[in-house]
């Protein structure tokens, strides 16, 4: 661990608070993500502090000297403090016992005088069960999380892991984000757990972390298979005629590298989830999977459309000079609302050789941009206002003329607004 870098990452005000807590007879530790990231050499702004050996009111009195503490989880002993733009969360050591269904079905009890080892036992994975004492920065690692992190192993802390089924999906996204491999005993434990008590919202959030956060999604897929999670998500199948997880993992990793090119989060979701479901039997399976975990309208609408277009695009890429013609690209852009996502998928597909993928994607993009249909779908050159100016009243003929003009536009037979208006004048004349 680079303690000089860690000292730089820990705000001076947090160190001052820690000194006050210690002076009052307490102990405190930075826990969770900050410690894990520090060992990995990553900077973090995830400041979760666990406080021992002092009463809640004593802690609140200290924190009031630095800002206005907010007791956001009274039953759990969680205090949030915003101080000079800095967000800090303080909690007390606690134990959890499963007493009911779902993620709310826990009896939570705080115990001010637990040892760090006892408190860390309730955490999910050893890599998240470490603590860094403040202000002296000594590592407490009762379950060998540092060693597991260095060996790239994701291992559960204790049998208490099984009490919260969300931890199964957390294992998938942690494997992806931190390039970890499941310990065999953890995989075996997860294979015996059900996800039936999880809400769709919680499932969706874990899938998004797996697919959207930087990492190696292929390792998440490996963990997914080792946990036998196709029990719950049978639509996630291998890619191609061989039903290959290796190819699907390769696709997910390549897509992950390209997601930062998309500034719009919804666009990222559409591309990433479509990639994950590339091996699904049909579009109905894609819709079935997504509708079980989310109600995001754009994702539910556009991912199946992109999924349906992919086989045609990959097949056409075998002869891009001929197949990626103007009409093909215009129609595809109308269907997809632009071609950026399709292009990124084409660049990433392991079903094409690297040479063919590069050639096809270059032709695809250059021609689509030249046509003005890469970023956005083409719009009709003929508008309703044009027809009104020609003296035509809105009605059935109105829509027929616009539809017919747009069809000719997609075929390349009408290319300018003037040509579109000339077409309309002729059509109106033949109808009168």
Image: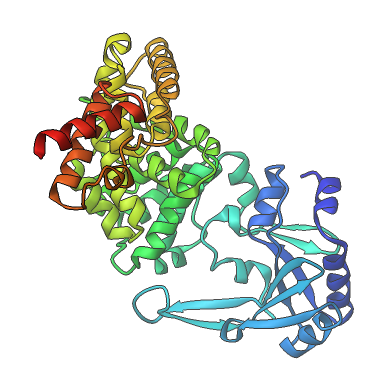
Name the residue nearer the viewer: 144 or 219: 219
Looking at the image, how many numbered discs can be counted on the residues?
A: 0
Image position of 10 with respect to 402: above or below = below
Instruction: Find the residue positioned furthest to the bottom.
Output: 57
Image quarter (top left, top right, bottom left or bottom right) of the C terminus: top left
Q: Is residue 171 visible?
A: yes
Q: How is the image coloured?
A: rainbow
Name the residue nearer the viewer: 240 or 326: 326
Where does the image place residue 387, in percent across and percent down from the top left?
27, 43
Where does the image place residue 227, in percent across and percent down from the top left?
34, 48
Residue depicted at 36% across the width and 26% down the height:
416
Residue depicted at 14% across the width and 45% down the height:
397
In the displayed structure image, the side of residue 131 where residue 272 appears, left or right: left
Image quarter (top left, top right, bottom left or bottom right) of the N terminus: top right
In the displayed structure image, the side of residue 3 where residue 51 appears, left or right: left
Residue depicted at 41% across the width and 69% down the height:
163
Where does the image place residue 333, in percent across and percent down from the top left?
33, 32
In the displayed structure image, the side of residue 396 where residue 95 appears, left or right: right
In the displayed structure image, the side of residue 285 where residue 250 appears, left or right: right
User: Which quadrant would residue 402 be assigned to in this image?
Assistant: top left
User: Which quadrant would residue 11 be assigned to in this image?
Assistant: bottom right
Residue depicted at 88% across the width and 70% down the height:
16
Name the residue nearer the viewer: 22 or 196: 196
Instruction: Find the residue positioned furthest to the left.
Output: 431
Name the residue nearer the viewer: 170 or 241: 241
Q: Is residue 183 visible?
A: no
Where does the image place residue 188, in percent across and percent down from the top left?
35, 51
User: Which quadrant would residue 246 be assigned to in this image?
Assistant: top left
């Amino acid at each position: 661990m680079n303690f000089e870098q860690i000292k730089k990452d820990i705000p001076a005000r947090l160190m001052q608070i820690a000194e006050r807590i210690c002076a009052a007879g307490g102990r405190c530790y930075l826990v969770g993500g900050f410690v894990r990231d520090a060992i990995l050499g990553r900077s973090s702004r995830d400041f979760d502090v666990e406080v021992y050996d002092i009463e809640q009111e004593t802690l609140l009195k200290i924190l009031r000297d630095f800002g206005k503490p907010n007791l956001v989880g009274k039953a759990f002993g969680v205090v949030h403090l915003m101080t000079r733009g800095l967000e800090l969360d303080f909690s007390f050591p606690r134990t959890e016992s499963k007493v009911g269904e779902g993620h709310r079905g826990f009896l939570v009890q705080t115990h001010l005088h637990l040892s760090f080892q006892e408190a860390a036992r309730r955490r999910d994975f050893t890599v998240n069960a470490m603590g860094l004492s403040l202000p002296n920065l000594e590592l407490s690692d009762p379950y060998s999380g540092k060693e597991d992190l260095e060996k790239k192993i994701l291992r559960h802390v204790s049998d208490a892991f099984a009490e919260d089924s969300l931890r199964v999906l957390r294992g998938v996204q942690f494997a992806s984000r931190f390039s970890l491999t499941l310990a065999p005993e953890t995989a075996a434990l997860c294979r015996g757990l059900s996800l039936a008590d999880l809400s769709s919202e919680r499932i969706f959030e874990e899938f998004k972390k797996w697919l959207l956060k930087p990492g190696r999604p292929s390792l998440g897929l490996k963990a997914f298979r080792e946990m036998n999670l196709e029990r719950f998500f049978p639509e996630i199948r291998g890619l191609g005629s061989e039903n290959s997880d290796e190819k699907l993992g390769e696709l997910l990793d390549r897509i992950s590298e390209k997601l930062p090119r998309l500034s719009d989060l919804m666009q990222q979701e559409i591309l990433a989830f479509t990639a994950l479901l590339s091996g699904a039997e049909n579009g109905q399976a894609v819709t079935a999977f997504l509708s079980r975990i989310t109600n995001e309208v754009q994702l539910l609408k556009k991912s199946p459309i992109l999924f349906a277009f992919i086989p045609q695009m990959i097949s056409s890429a075998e002869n891009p000079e001929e197949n990626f013609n103007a009409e093909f690209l215009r129609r595809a852009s109308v269907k997809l609302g632009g071609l950026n996502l399709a292009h990124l998928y084409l660049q990433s597909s392991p079903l094409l050789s690297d040479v063919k993928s590069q050639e096809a994607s270059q032709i695809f993009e250059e021609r689509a941009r030249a046509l003005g249909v890469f970023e956005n779908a083409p719009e009709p050159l003929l508008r309703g206002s044009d027809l009104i100016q020609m003296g035509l009243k809105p009605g059935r003929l109105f829509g027929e003329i616009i539809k017919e003009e747009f069809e000719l536009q997609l075929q390349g037979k009408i290319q300018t607004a003037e040509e579109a208006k000339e077409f309309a004048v002729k059509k109106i004349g033949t109808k009168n």
